[in-house]
Image (spheres, grey):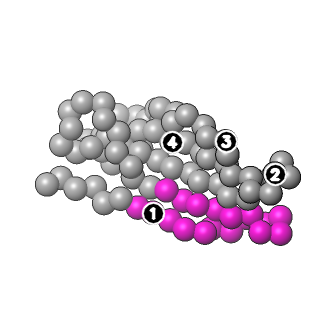
Amino acid sequence: MTTQAPVNLQYDTKAKSNSFEHFSQASITSIDLDKDGVADFVIAQAWHRGIMLASAIHQPADRAIFVNAGGRWYLFDIDQYIICGC
């Protein structure tokens, strides 16, 4: 398993007034189950800053899991976390 440390993303802060609508970090994790040097699963994740948090705390936003079957990539699953301002 190879995990990339989350990378801070840059965006135009003037584009939208709500900074929580932008992804603040992203990372990719590769998983090679049969150890042939080619990833069998890839997980792409994105985070955003919480609505109610003025600090630099990042919360999960989206995750997409892809599977390599027969040399072709397919979308396996998607997770989305609802942004709650409660």
Cα gap from disc 4 to disc 3, whole angstroms: 15 Å
Evaluate if marks 4 and 3 touch, with contact meaning CB atoms under 8 Å apart. Answer: no
Evaluate if marks 2 and 1 touch, with contact meaning CB atoms under 8 Å apart. Answer: no
Cα gap from disc 2 to disc 1, whole angstroms: 27 Å
Task: Tell me which amino acid carries mark 1.
Answer: Asp
Magenta stretch in the rendered image: 63-80
Q: In this image, 67 relative to 44: left or right?
A: right
Please report whichever mark, 2 or 4, sits nearer to the chain's N-terminal start.
4
Task: Name the mark on residue 26.
Answer: 4
Q: Residue 72 in the image: x percent, y percent?
A: 79, 66
74 part of magenta stretch:
yes
Please report whichever mark, 3 or 2, sits nearer to the chain's N-terminal start.
3
69 part of magenta stretch:
yes
Cα gap from disc 3 to disc 2, whole angstroms: 12 Å
Above or below, 51 relative to 71? above
Task: Tell me which amino acid carries mark 2.
Answer: Lys
Seen as rendered, the residue at the extreme front is: 34
Please report whichever mark, 2 or 1, sits nearer to the chain's N-terminal start.
2
User: Which residue appears at 68% of the width and 64% of the height?
Assistant: 67
Cα gap from disc 2 to disc 4, whole angstroms: 25 Å
Task: Tell me which amino acid carries mark 3.
Answer: Thr
- Counting other residues with Cα less than 10 Å from the Cα at mark 2, is it few (<14), some (14-19), or many (20 or more)? few
Callout 3 secondary element: strand
Tag 3 residue: 2
Cα gap from disc 3 to disc 1, whole angstroms: 20 Å
Tag 1 residue: 79
Task: Name the mark on residue 35.
Answer: 2
Task: Tell me which amino acid carries mark 4.
Answer: Ala
